[in-house]
Image: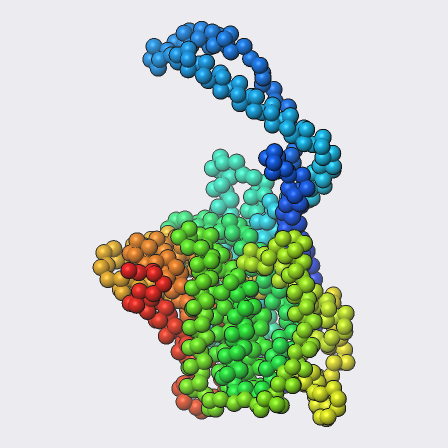
Amino acid sequence: MLLTKIGIDMQNDQEKKSGLGLLSYIWTEWISTFVILVLLLMTLVIGTGEMIHGQLLRMGERLYGDPDTGMQYSFLRAEPEKPSCDRHPNIDAQVQEQMKINAADEFASMFGVASEADVRASLIAAREQCDEKYQFYDKAMKHMEAHPSIRTYRKIETSFFGIFKFGTENRALFLVIMVVFAAISATLKTHHIGLRSPATKIDFRVYSVAMLLGNGFLTSSVISQYNSVMNSGVPMSPEMKIIYWLWMVLFGCLTLISLFQLAKPPTPTRQGGNIGLAFLSVPLYAYMAIITGVAFTIFMDYPMGQGIYLGQLVEFSNIFLNLALFIWAGMLLKQTRIVDLFLNILRPWNLAPETLTWLILIAAALPTAYTGASGIFVIAAGAIIYKEVWNAGGRRQFALAATALSGSMGVVLRPCLLIVVVASLNKEVTTDLLYQYGLYTFLLTSTLFLIIALIFAEQKFRIAPLNIALPKSLRAFVPVSPYIVIFVLIWLFYKHALATDLNEFTAPVMMPIILLMMVLFDKLRKEPAPLAPVGHWDSTLNTYTAPVDGTQPAPQINPEDDPRKPERNVSFGKALHLATSETVGHIGALVILMALSVSVGGFLEHIQIMEAFPKDISSTFVVISLIVMLMIFVGMIMDPFGAVILITATVAPVAYQYGIDPVHFWMIALVGFELGYITPPVALNHLLARQAIGDAEVAEADAEVRHLSFFYRYERWIFPLLVMVPAILIIAYVPYFFKLFGWYH
């Protein structure tokens, strides 16, 4: 088995060094990585530049504004133009002239003629308006003469604005270019998300056929849409023309890549396989593309349907660019030992696995909220959480369950990007309201996790003596403190220098910068790179808990963890390359999946699925029950952002009409989505956990429980359901029956 694996790895390395394999390697590891890095940095610069420009405007107001005269800097950002109107007109002459014109009007008998008094009043009002313009002009010029430096400052401010205006106006173009490069890389590396990774020859055959069909439908759709727009006679902006061409190039390339992979499939990693399991290897994105392609093209005679709904990506370009930044921040996090160092504070307490997991999930809620979606955090930190729970004595299946749940609890907390999307699409709710009640939801789900975990725990409670654990824990806090200082300093800079606080709108820009500074800090200190996230923890971390006075022997260090090993000596440039390369794959897989999820939502909207919703239900209980089931179903088949867009257009208005409080509705929806993401057969968070941890590790976890009872064999599926099902039932029904929060009377 080992020799076979070595042989396969050598063969794969050889393929990378020759022919099309070399070209694919150069594209995925260098070209796309470089392009995505440039686009991500440009997005950061543009975002920060907008903050700087905002501060320049505020500074200009403080320097040159005069509250006493009402003169504001915003009035003076352009040179005041002298009015061209007559300040001292001859009103009498103008009245007589206008009366003659009115009398000669052939329609006067039909519509009547304004009286002399009305004409005079109108001309006097015009004179007054003209006089006001002159007064403002005179006041502005006098103000500028009193502040001669305003012209210099204005030139600096407007020039700065001009630099970033291009980026601000072309965010959609940046996003589509990013998706083009990332999706091609994800396809070349077979990185798209499926129920299982292709491994056998038949897996790759079925995978390639499905990808060929799906990409073929998408190519045909975007071409059809482009031709339709060109033939409509409606003018198309140069930016949109480029975007249409980029879509056609992207899906055309993906179709050709899929055709090539069908003709020459990748080397299988194992022998055997069967057709049934092979269909499980097909990416969710391909299934969505085929289903919507067949529906729109064949049954609805609407071939441009997929292309039209891809436009949602462009419409919400800011949201998806922020998502890309969060993914990058997550991958940068993986290049440091920050998570391990924080966990090192807990290790001396020797907590029971269930209690430790509960604390980890509570701590994970904050970065989950800042990453904006549960799946991103699972990808970024899922393997570390799995490793920690397992090494603490937890069952592997329990560790897998915790990994899948790790991203589900913080999505209702500030500053989650998903809630920003909900509030932007639904004027009935605000982010403040959703975050306020989201806190109650978080407390409920985290408490339920602890209760359920303790029910199945082999050892209910375990904790080390205070006199032993506390000194070690405090010593472990020392290496963490520099990272806290970096976070605080950058936060203070933005808060005071740029008058920008860390919130749901600024987090996408600030978090990658914070992580970049932390990675740079590590590399300047020559900190070793983190070990692979699956396996034992880094034994060198134990040195941080050892007393410095030598009262205890130095902890033993595993030779495999030696920080002097060349593979752990990673430069800042190498770390940046590794993080960005991983980001490329995840952007290509996740964003394309979200785009097709929106297409599925559009298909469901197009067939008017909500027409099946009963029209005259007298029971609010029944309405809530239908909403719960529908939210879970949507969460099972769609990503969160696509689900929000679909639900906003279809279910939400119907729910409001039946008297469901909007805040209550969206709490049900968000928790229902998360329940759907851990519910078979799709269970997106489980798929992402598998992607983060690795198929081999998951297979070993399954193998070691085959002889146990049903619960322990399927614990990674059952345990999250035992937490989330009671959570959604409580959230859905308790506020209604007990009239909580003033939602119902």
Q: Is residue 113 above or below residue 227?
A: above
Indicate the colouring scheme. Answer: rainbow
On the image, the x and y values in percent for residue 43 come to: 63, 54
Question: Closest to the observer: 744 or 166?
Answer: 744
Seen from the viewer's position, the closer of residues 434 and 640 is 434
Q: Residue at the spot x=54%, y=10% of the render?
A: 90
Q: Is residue 208 above or below residue 649?
A: below
| The C terminus, quarter of image | bottom left
- Give the residue displayed 67% in from the left and 58% down from the top: 493
Residue 528 placed where, x, y %?
73, 76
Quadrant of the rendered image containing residue 632: bottom left
Residue 172 percent across, percent down from the top left: 57, 49
* Total numbered labels placed on residues in the image: 0
Answer with left or right where residue 216 lies relative to residue 529: left
Q: Is residue 150 visible?
A: yes
Judged from this view, the residue extending furthest toward the front is 68
> Is the N terminus in the top left, top right, bottom left or bottom right quadrant?
bottom right
x and y, in percent, of residue 399 in the image: 51, 81
Q: Nearer the viewer, residue 578 or 366?
A: 366
- Is residue 430 rendered to the left or right of residue 325? left
Up/down of 384 relative to 469, above or below: above
Is any atom of residue 393 visible in this view?
no
Residue at 35% x, 15% y is: 111
Residue occupying the point 54% across, 86% down: 351
